[in-house]
Image: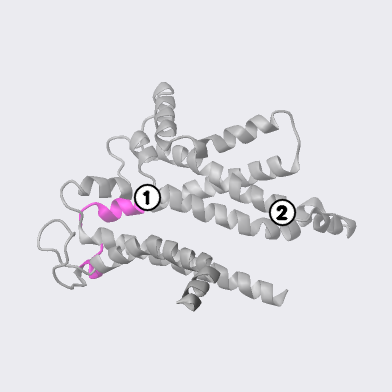
Amino acid sequence: MTRLIGWVRRNLVVLAGIIALAYLVLPNLVVLAFSFNKPAGKFNYEWQQFSTDAWTDPCGVADMCGSLTLSLKIAALATLGATVLGTMVAFALARYRFSGRAATTALIFLPMAMPEVVMAASLGTLFLNMRIPFGFTTILIAHIMFCLSFVVTAVKARVMSMDPRLEQAAQDLYATPVQTFLRITLPLAAPGIAAGALLSFALSFDDFIITQFNSGPTTVTFPMFVWGASQRGIPVQVNVIGTAMFLAAVVLTVVGQTIGNRRKARA
């Protein structure tokens, strides 16, 4: 008993991490399991019978794949816009000192601190006052504004940890500013940029509140489709899409870790 208590004390942090990870992964495993269920009624809450019908026909529900395509398109464009703008803002905040720098930093990080519904209502009011029709464009602008802060946070942390002497060495070897940026600065900042882009894509694809306030009556994204379907019974195909997204995220994470470990081994 004493040995067991001692072992638990030595590995308490590891055990807590495993428990937390299991708590996070367990809902995804439930979604995976029920994607192979064949419910008796409209609601996929109780296990009835094993079936692969939903996997063989993921677009069997009307308008679901259309809303999924729309969400992927918005997420990709929002990620591109937020990553480009966020990277430039992060470099400006980390490398340069200018008037209003502290206020700009506070404004950039404000969307991360305030409730999401406040930003959604504010953007909706702005679009109404500017008489911009609600739809694809308003959702895209709102998602870029929402994701911008997260990209700036990830890229800025990476830029501040970079050694400026590497860029100075490139300049001493007669590299032009463009060559220095493309061959030294950008590769060093790439992990932070990639992290910000992935986080931006996940937030945009998964967002419901901001989309609900700025979508209009005819534009339906995948989270809005799931919310509407929950009132009359969520189809099994939703579990299939959720499982596919989860597995894609796991694959990207494993590939990224593998590439990083190989680079460290070569260095």
Q: Residue at x 21, y 49 (%)?
A: 229
Q: Residue at x 21, y 72 (%)?
A: 52
Question: Quarter of the image holding residue 165?
Answer: bottom right
Horizontal arrangement in the rendering, residue 70 relative to residue 177 (left or right): left
Between residues 18 and 132, which one lies in front from this camera angle?
18
Whole-percent x and y of residue 253?
Answer: 50, 66
Give me the disc on residue 161: 2
Between residues 112 and 71, which one lies in front from this camera angle?
112
Q: Is residue 125 above or below residue 253?
A: above
Whole-percent x and y of residue 222?
Answer: 32, 50
Q: Is residue 114 above or below residue 266?
A: above
Q: Which residue is mark 1?
A: 71
Question: Quarter of the image holding residue 58?
Answer: bottom left
56 part of magenta stretch: yes
Whole-percent x and y of residue 118?
Answer: 42, 31
The span picked out in magenta is 54-69
